[in-house]
Structure formats: C-alpha cells, structure tokens
Image: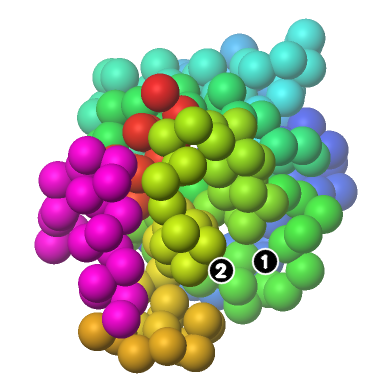
Amino acid sequence: MRVVIAEDLALLRDGLTRLLEAYDFKVVAAVDNGPSLLPALLEHRPDVAVIDVRLPPTFTDEGLQAAIAARDAVPGMPVLVLSQHVEPLYARELLSDRKGGVGYLLKDRVSHVAQFVDAVRRVAAGGTAMDPEVVSQLLARNEPPLAALTGREREVLGQMAEGRSNGAIAAKLFIGEKAVSKHISSIFTKLDLPVSDDDHRRVLAVLAYLNS
C-alpha cells in the first residue's frame, strides 16, 4: 500500500516512515513543506496520504489545502490528517465532498501503534477514522440540530462519527445491535438524513450535516 507523508518535524516524519514500512506500507514520498505536498500527491497518487495540517512556510493550513486540491484533481484520494489541535473548520472542508476515505487524529492522542495503523488502513480502504475529541467538538458546535436527540442517541451518533460499525457500537455502549439500529434510524429521521447501508457514507453524511 503506497503512502505519501507530509510532516515538517524530521524525527516524527522519519518515525512515521519507519513505522508504516514496518507494517508493509510503502512510503513513496515524505515531504516537509506545503509547496512540495501537492506535486507529490499528484505524481504518486497514493493509496493514502498522512498529512499535518500546518506546514511551512506559513504554518497555517498548507497541508489541508494541498489535500483538498489533490482530492479535487483525484476524486476520493484517501487522506488522514494528523494535527496538534482540533480544527473543526478543517474537518468540515475535508468532509464536504463526501468522497473517499478521510480521517482526523490528534497527534498527542495517538498512543497505540496498532490503532494508528488500523486507522491508516481504514482510511485507505475508503473508511473514516475520527478522533473522539474532534467528534466531541463537532457535536458541541452544533447544538441546535442535535437538540431533538436523546442522550443515548447522541452517544450512538458520536460512536458512528468515529467510524464504528453497529456491532462495535453495541459492544461499546453495552446494548444490543437491534437497539443500535433503532437509535440510528431515529437519528437519521430527526436529522432529516436518508438512511444508507454504506457505513462510510452515513458517517460522512452525519458529520457534513453537523458542520453545515
């Protein structure tokens, strides 16, 4: 599986490269600045890109803008964002086209190698990997649309937004899968979102709605 990495800190960039290669990924490019990222993405068209949002020269949103431009040129290019901070605006922009795998993880919360590698693979496969703190802030910023949801429905919605399946949600919340299905149907009804059998698309729909 081919990967492009964008990270300005040399030690972290090298560490990510070694880690992913140890798990049978092939790092085809590892860049340390914004201007180099878009050409690398368009040249290599990786199976997944792992990028920092804030890259030189301005340390604002170069990484994100390059990722969005790449996804415009190559629709659905999978992108996993690693950031020091929760940036709801960035998450909204990344999710806006609802195509291809996306992820948003906070660097200081990625403490388990297996979980990180799983997130990379999930995004590469077209899935979603959202940090719980990112999800929490997205939900908190959109209280009015969620006012109709019960406390349990909000819990289920949060688990959905993190990319969990119905079975995983049931296990996490200690309830049955039928109960999860009923909660999800209720959530979609209350948020005026169409029910979909595609787990990835339903997560993107929920997050896109919450960020509208």
Instruction: Find numbered disc 2 in the image and state the secondary structure of the residue it sits on.
Output: helix
Dot placed on the residue nearer the N-terminal end, 1 or 2: 1
Report x, y in % for residue 44: 38, 35
Q: The N terminus appears in which quarter of the rendering?
A: bottom left
Report x, y in % for residue 150: 46, 59
Q: Is residue 174 above or below residue 204?
A: below
Asked whether 147 or 142 is in front, the reply is 147
Q: Is residue 108 magenta?
A: no
Relative placement, left or right, of 100 versus 16 is left
The answer to whether any part of residue 6 appears in the image is no
Q: Residue furthest top?
A: 58
Q: Which residue is mark 2?
A: 117
Examine the image and state in which quarter residue 116 appears.
bottom right
Relative placement, left or right, of 183 versus 7 is left
Asked whether 201 or 103 is in front, the reply is 201
Q: Residue at x 77, y 69 (%)?
A: 111
Residues in magenta, as a range: 179-199
Mark sitting on residue 19: 1
Residues at badges 1 and 2 in contact (C-beta under 8 Å)?
yes
Q: Is residue 191 magenta?
A: yes
Examine the image and state in which quarter residue 102 appears.
top left
Q: Residue at x 86, y 48 (%)?
A: 11
Residues packed near mark 2 inside 10 Å, few (<14), some (14 to 19) or many (20 plus): some
Query: Nearer the observer, disc 1 or disc 2?
Result: 2
Asked whether 117 or 39 is in front, the reply is 117
